Image (spheres, rainbow, N blue to C red):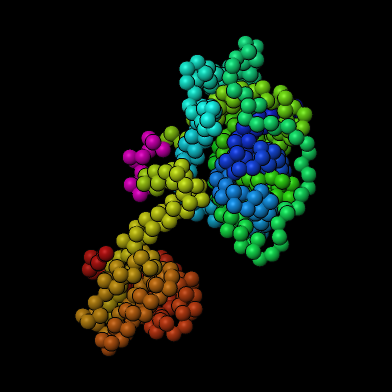
Amino acid sequence: MDAARIKTELLAGLTVALALVPEAVAFAFVAGVNPLVGLYAAFFVGLITACIGGRPGMISGATGALAVVMVSLVAQHGVEYLFATVVLMGLIQLLVGVLRWGKFIRMVPHPVMLGFVNGLAIVIFLAQMGQFKVDDGAGGLTWMSGSQLYLMLGLVALTMAVIWFLPKLTTAFPAPLAGILVVSALALGFNLDTRSVGNLADISGGLPQFHIPMVPLNFETLEIILPYAIILAAIGLIESLLTLNLVADMTNTKGGASKECLAQGTANVVTGFFGGMGGCAMIGQSMINVKSGARTRLSGISAALFLLSFIMVASPLIAQIPVAALVGVMFMVVIGTFAWTSLKIMHKIPLTDALVMIIVTGVTVYADLAVAVVVGVIISALAYAWNAASRIRSRIGTSKEGWKVYRLSGPLFFGSTTGFADLFNPQEDPDDVVIDFIDSRVVDHSGLEAIDALASKYEAAGKRLHLRHLSPDCQKLLAKAGNLVEVSVLEDPDYEIAVDYGHKFDEPGKAV
C-alpha cells in the first residue's frame, strides 16, 4: 500500500469517525442507554468487522434499526439484560456463519434490494429531522424557527455545497471531511450561535472495561433475552448482508457473506462483554467511506481508532463541531443512497416488481428492515409461483407403440397441480398413456400427489399410465416417495435431450 492510498484511507476513516459520533449518540438515546454505550459499540463493532469482515471498506456500528428493538428490553429489564442479549445475539450470528446460511441472501430479489436502499435513505433522512428540534422549556421538543432555523439550514446547505463541488476540483481530500472542517471553522471563527456535538451529550470517557452482564444465569433470563436476541440477530445480518452486496456492486468486488456473519457475531459477543449496545453494518457510513475513496480495511480500522481517541482525549474538540455540518453530510448520503433510477424504470418493469419495491420501501420506513425484506421476498416468491404455475402445458402426440403421449413443459409443483390435472382426459384416452417429462420436472410433494391422483383415475378407468424421461432428481423424488406413486416408469437407456424418440405430435396441444 503506497503513501497516497494510506492517506486516502486514513482521511476517509476520520470522516467516518466524525459522522459516527452523532449517530451513535442518537441511537443510544433511542435505545434508552448512556451515550458511551453507543460509542463503545461503534468502536468494537467497527474495529472487529473492519479486521475480519467479508467486505473491506464496509463500516459497522450502532444502528437505529437495532436501537428501536432494544427500547422495550431496556425499559422493562434494564441495561444489564441488554448486554446479555447482545452476547446471545452475537452467538446466534456466529452459528449462522458457521452453518454458512449467509449465502441465502442471494434469494433476495433485486426489487427488494432497491426498496431496501430507498427505504433506508428515507430513514436516514428522517433521523436527521430530530436535529432541527430544540427544547421547548417544558420538557418537550419543538421545531426551530426564525434566525436559529435559517442559520442551521444555511450551514447544512454550505456543507452540502462543499461536498458537491469539491470533487469537481480535486479528489485528493475527502469532500465530506472538507465540508465538516469548513463549516466548523466558519462557526468558530464568527462565533455563530448554533448547536454543536457537545450540546447532544458528553462523549468523554476512558477505555472500555471488560464487564460480565449482571443477570441471573437461569432459564427465566433466557426466556427474556432469547426473543430479542433472535430479532436483533436477524435484523443485523440482513442489514449487513444487503449493505455488503451494495458496497460490492459499487466497488465491483465480491464479498464473503458467511465471513461477514462470523465477523458480526464475533463483534457483538465482544461488545456485549464491554458494555456496548451491539451493532451491524451502516449503509450511510459505508457510503461515506466508499465515496471518500476507501477500498481497504485500513479505513474501517482507523475510523474505529479515531472514534476511541475522540472518547478518550479529543472530546473537547469534537464537541465544538456544528451539528449542522454532520446533518449536511448525512443529507448528501441520502441523495447518494437513494436509487433514483428506480423512479425512471418504474413504468418499464413488471407491475409486481414495482409493487414489491414500493412495499419494501414503505415497510422499511414504518416498521423495520427485517420485516420489509421478509415481506418483499414472500411477495416476490408468490408472484414467481403464480407465474410458473401458469406455464404448465402439454403437446399431445402418438408414440411408435401407438400410445397417446402428453409431452409436458413447465414445472410440476404445488402451484401448477390444478393446471396439470386439467390437461388429461382419463375417460376418453386409450389404454396406454405416456407422460413425457423431457421438458418438465417434478419439484415437490404436491407434484407427486398430483401424479398419484392422476394414476388412480387411469387405473379406475382400466388404463395404464407411464412416465418417461424423468430427470435424475425427479427419479430421486419418486424413489423417496416409496409406494406413493404407483405407476410404471419408462426409462431410455441413452437419455439425451436431442434424441428423436419417435413421438408424433400431430395436434396443436393444450395449455393452461
At a point 69% along the width and 31% down the height, the residue shown is 202
Q: How many marks?
A: 0
Q: Which residue of the protein is positioned furthest toward the front in this rendering?
A: 138
Quadrant of residue 397 within the rendered picture = bottom left
Q: Is residue 494 above or below residue 175?
A: below
Is residue 351 rendered magenta in the image?
Answer: yes
At a point 23% along the width and 65% down the height, the residue shown is 508
In the image, residue 334 lies at what x, y percent?
Answer: 51, 32
**Which of the two residues, 138 or 432, is positioned nearer the viewer here?**
138
Q: The N terminus is located in which quarter? A: top right
Q: The C terminus is located in which quarter? A: bottom left
Quadrant of residue 382 within the rendered picture = bottom left
In the image, residue 391 lies at what x, y percent?
Answer: 32, 61
Report whether residue 12 is seen. no
In the image, residue 92 lies at what x, y percent?
Answer: 64, 58
In the image, residue 501 lies at what x, y percent?
Answer: 36, 72
> Is 449 left or right of 395, judged from the image as shown?
right
Region rendered in magenta: 342-353
At a point 64% along the width and 62% down the height, the residue shown is 222
